Amino acid sequence: MKEEHQEYYKSYIKLFPDLNSEELSFLRSYLTIEEYDKKEFLFRSGEVQKEVAFVCKGLLRRYYINEKGNKITTGFVNENNYATDYPAFIRQIPSKYFIECLEPSVIIKLPYDKIQEGYKRYKRSEMYGRLIAEYVLTFQTDRVESFLFKNAEERYLDFVAHNKDIINRISLSHLSTYLGIERQSLSRIRSKIAKR
């Protein structure tokens, strides 16, 4: 195993400080690490995601294709976050989304069946599963509410404020579909803000 990969494993394991040595050993034994090239897919629409994926390095985007054939971005996933369509993953049903690498990425994976086994065997594993679910739910709710209660400029400013680490790593096209506005409108908003 690459030395770099060893470091990623160690960092990932540190996310579970409450697990005892037996629980950590169980977790460690089923983790795999994979490298992805730019434009490679973690999974595609219609596929069942068999492993939960944690991004050690890189940037991915989640999108779907609407009835007009346009790719609509619904999220970006960078380092130290989970790349998943969680509702489909926990039900093991085909996803409606694509998750594509925008940069070369290194990803740690843990199989669905081993996560379920861990839940049954270890109470603390269940707690971590719940924390991941809560994080995903909060993120999705925030996104929906931003469309309900904020205008385009507010959504953009909000995104910049919470994503300083990736704002310069994503294209305006991807960002505009994420914010639900035309690319030209996004350019106008950006130049208006720059003049302030």
Image: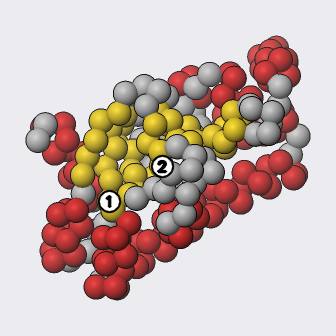
Label 2 secondary element: strand
Residue displayed at 30% across by 36% down = 35
Mark sitting earlier along the chain (1/2) = 2
Q: Which residue is mark 2?
A: 83
Question: What amino acid is labelled 1 in the image?
Answer: Leu
**On the picture, is 181 further left or further right than 69?**
right
Residue 147 at least partly seen: yes
Q: Which mark is residue 23?
A: none
Q: Position of residue 105 (x, y in %)?
A: 37, 34
For the N terminus, the image quarter is top left
Residue drawn at x 68%, y 22% as measured from the top left: 172
Residue 14 rendering spot, x and y as whole percentages: 27, 59
Q: CA distance from mark 1 to mark 2?
A: 12 Å
Examine the image and state in which quarter residue 104 appears.
top left
Q: Residues within 10 Å of mark 2 (few under 14, many from 20)?
A: many
Q: Quadrant of residue 20?
A: bottom left
Quadrant location of the C terminus in the rendered image: top right
Q: Secondary structure beneath disc 1? A: strand
At x 19% / y 71%, what residue is drawn? 26
Q: Three-letter amino acid code at disc 2?
A: Ala
Relative to the observer, which residue lies in front, 70 or 21?
Answer: 70
Left or right of 136, for residue 50: left
> Which residue position is annotated with label 1?
110
Q: Is residue 33 above or below residue 192?
A: below
Q: Position of residue 79 (x, y in %)?
A: 42, 41
- In this rendering, position of residue 174 left or right of residue 3: right
Packing grade of label 1 (10 A; few <14, some 14-19, many >=20) is some
Q: Is residue 127 above or below residue 170?
A: below
